[in-house]
Amino acid sequence: MLTESSLLFNTQISPSYWHARLCASAAFVREAAPGRFVMLRVNDTTDPLLRRPFAIFDADDDASGAPVFEILYRVVGKATTILSAKKEGDVLDVLGPLGKGFDLGAPAGEHLLVGGGVGLAPLYALAKKLRAASSTVLLFAGGRRRDDILCAEAFASLGVECHFATEDGSIGERALVTEPLTRYLESQGAKAAIYACGPEGMLRAVAQIAARRAIPCQVSLESRMACGVGVCLGCVVAGRRTAPQTPDFRCVCSEGPVFDANEIDWEGA
Ligand SMILES: Cc1cc2nc3c(=O)[nH]c(=O)nc-3n(C[C@H](O)[C@H](O)[C@H](O)COP(=O)(O)OP(=O)(O)OC[C@H]3O[C@@H](n4cnc5c(N)ncnc54)[C@H](O)[C@@H]3O)c2cc1C
Ligand code: FES
């Protein structure tokens, strides 16, 4: 669905990251399954021409019962710089919710969420859904520095057990996030499912860790998007053929952004 949504807040939460809340409809909130995303147009001009994709961090009724949704974003270029200057009451053109989110049908057991930076955005929506069903959820959040570990308190307040790792050791252990994840998997006999979102190198490493242990693993991918609805094929990534006639690419916006990690050709991605 395409709507015009007012910004309710747009707040800088750390040097590079912003958190925004926008008005939504009840239908939007119903359809905003964890892992789905929106395409936002940040102004009325042709520069930038294309909408930009953002994961839905949360979609719910606010304290007054009005439907709203939230995004977390990092300022990296033109569209996100324009977005960061928007104020309460400004209107944005929103297309979504789009794409396929996380499959919540994994067998009962521990749900291990792995991410960092804005990769934590879809994982928060996922954690909220899983905790509402009283599932056990652990978060392994990593990044270069403290700044990349977003919304740690929000995860903790859901009842998520949080493990942090940063490259400079400014929060949690000084390590890549795959280290505490691997250690945890080695120390536990419990059934687990992994859900990851973050930089490609981290996703590849997490996919390898899961494959070695035959643990189900879903990854939320990022790629450059133009249309967001499966038309331009600008977002495709290399996939694994599941049968001789099936294509060896995956369309991230319409078939994903969440995929079973085994569906992706990590060498060609
Ligand atoms: C499904 C999906 C969900 C996303 N969710 C979020 C989110 O929740 N929060 C958030 O901050 N960002 C998210 N992104 C990335 C976000 O769309 C880009 O950061 C944004 O489009 C950048 O626009 P810009 O005009 O500011 O930067 P541009 O000028 O377009 O790009 C600036 C720099 O960022 C790089 N870049 C831009 N887009 C991508 C991308 N998709 N993948 C890798 N590198 C990129 C460019 O190569 C360039 O170096 C998501 C992307 C996808 C595909
Ligand atoms: S962005 Fe156009 S097909 Fe995916």
Image (cartoon, grey):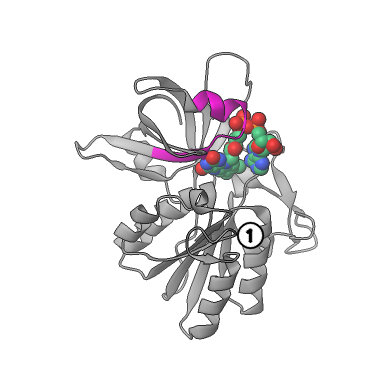
The span picked out in magenta is: 70-83
* Residue drawn at (35%, 55%) of the image: 153
Q: To which residue does mark 1 refer?
A: 203
* Mark 1, secondary structure of its residue: helix
The count of marks equals 1
As for residue 73 lying within the magenta part, the answer is yes
* Residue drawn at (70%, 33%) of the image: 232
User: Is residue 160 placed above or below 100 in the rendered structure?
Assistant: below
The amino acid at mark 1 is Leu
Position of 146 with respect to 240 (left or right) is left
Rendering coords of residue 4 (x, y %): 42, 23
Quadrant occupied by the C terminus: bottom right
Rendering coords of residue 221 (x, y %): 62, 51
User: Is residue 10 placed above or below 214 in the rendered structure?
Assistant: above
Regarding residue 203, the answer to whether it shows in the image is yes
Would you identify the image quadrant in which residue 169 lies?
A: bottom right
Would you identify the image quadrant in which residue 155 lies?
A: bottom left
Q: Residues within 10 Å of mark 1 (few under 14, many from 20)?
A: many
Rendering coords of residue 219 (x, y %): 58, 58
